[in-house]
Image: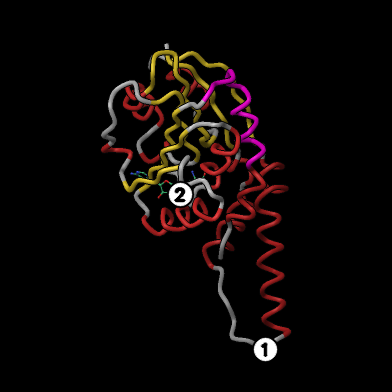
Amino acid sequence: MDTDPIRENLNKYTAKAFHMLPKMNEPCILDIGCGSGVPTMELARLSNGQVVAIDIDQAALDKLSKNIEQAGLSHRIKTLRCSMFELDFQDESFDIIWAEGSISRIGFKRGLEEWRRFLKPNGFLVIHDDINNIHQKLKHISSCGYEILGHFTLSEDIWWAEYYGPLERRINDILMKYIDESKDFVEFDSEQQEIEMFKKNPKLFRSVFFVMQKR
Ligand SMILES: C[S@@+](CC[C@H](N)C(=O)[O-])C[C@H]1O[C@@H](n2cnc3c(N)ncnc32)[C@H](O)[C@@H]1O
């Protein structure tokens, strides 16, 4: 199931974080763990800059490449199959590093430490991560050489209204259609499991945007 159109409901928060940065002309942006690129495309629309989008999932990158081409953004967004553990860019090459839903792979502190050198002096790092250990994360931000410019939370109500609620409705619509048309049953196991997990413990799904500047 293509969840990108629902994921796009969260673009307003990508935009909110982006607008917490000072205005920049043609910034170079690195999007780490871009997936199929819903935030990547939004970053290209919000800025007039160049975006390098990296992920290890080739299928997701292929989907993003198609979307880039269709949107006429091939001159602004480049995709690259590359692990966040093996970044091979020149030091100080990006104005902004962006990572939504991906830093947990490497760990918050390690990501902050290892990605810092790729930022230009006074460059910006924006992380969208789960809310776990938020006080510890805020401490890591200053101990790893960044200043926090601001942070905001996406509550469980936001996640329900903007993502899990619409996802559940979409699944139910599709299932009803299949029943009406007596087609073979379709399964949405992973999506339905995630919705059930959300309903059991919605607070676990709160997330935070951290907007920081390299110092
Ligand atoms: C939850 S998705 C987030 C996708 C996108 N940033 C978004 O917010 O819609 C996490 C992404 O991190 C990617 N990822 C996982 N391990 C990675 C690694 N070692 N290097 C780069 N990307 C990785 C996954 O393939 C996945 O696309």
Whether 23 is among the magenta residues is: yes
Q: Where is residue 160 in the image (x, y as percent from the top left)?
A: 69, 48
Location of the N terminus (image quadrant) = bottom right
Query: In the orientation shown, which residue stands out farthest toward the bottom?
Result: 182
Q: Can residue 199 be seen in this view?
A: no
- 214 to 90, vertically: above or below: above
Viewer-proximal residue, 193 or 65? 65
Q: Position of residue 128 (x, y in %)?
A: 53, 34
Task: Tell me the residue that label 2 is attached to.
Answer: 35
Residue shown at 44%/41% (left/top)?
A: 102
Q: Position of residue 91 (x, y in %)?
A: 29, 23
Estimate the spatial distance between the alpha carbons at disc 1 and disc 2, rounded to whole Å: 34 Å
Residue shown at 54%/49% (left/top)?
A: 72
Whether the residue under disc 2 has CB within 8 Å of ligand 1 = yes
- In what element is the residue under mark 1? loop
Which numbered tag is attached to residue 182?
Answer: 1
Question: Do residues under tags 1 and 2 come within 8 Å of each other at their CB atoms?
Answer: no
Where residue 172 sits, quadrant-wise, is: bottom right
Q: What residue type is labelled 1?
A: Ser
Whether the residue under disc 1 has CB within 8 Å of ligand 1 = no
- In what element is the residue under mark 2? loop
Report the span colored magenta: 11-25
Q: What residue type is labelled 2?
A: Gly
Viewer-proximal residue, 98 or 133? 98
Where residue 186 sits, quadrant-wise, is: bottom right
In the image, is 123 to the left or to the right of 183? Answer: left
- 206 to 125, vertically: above or below: below
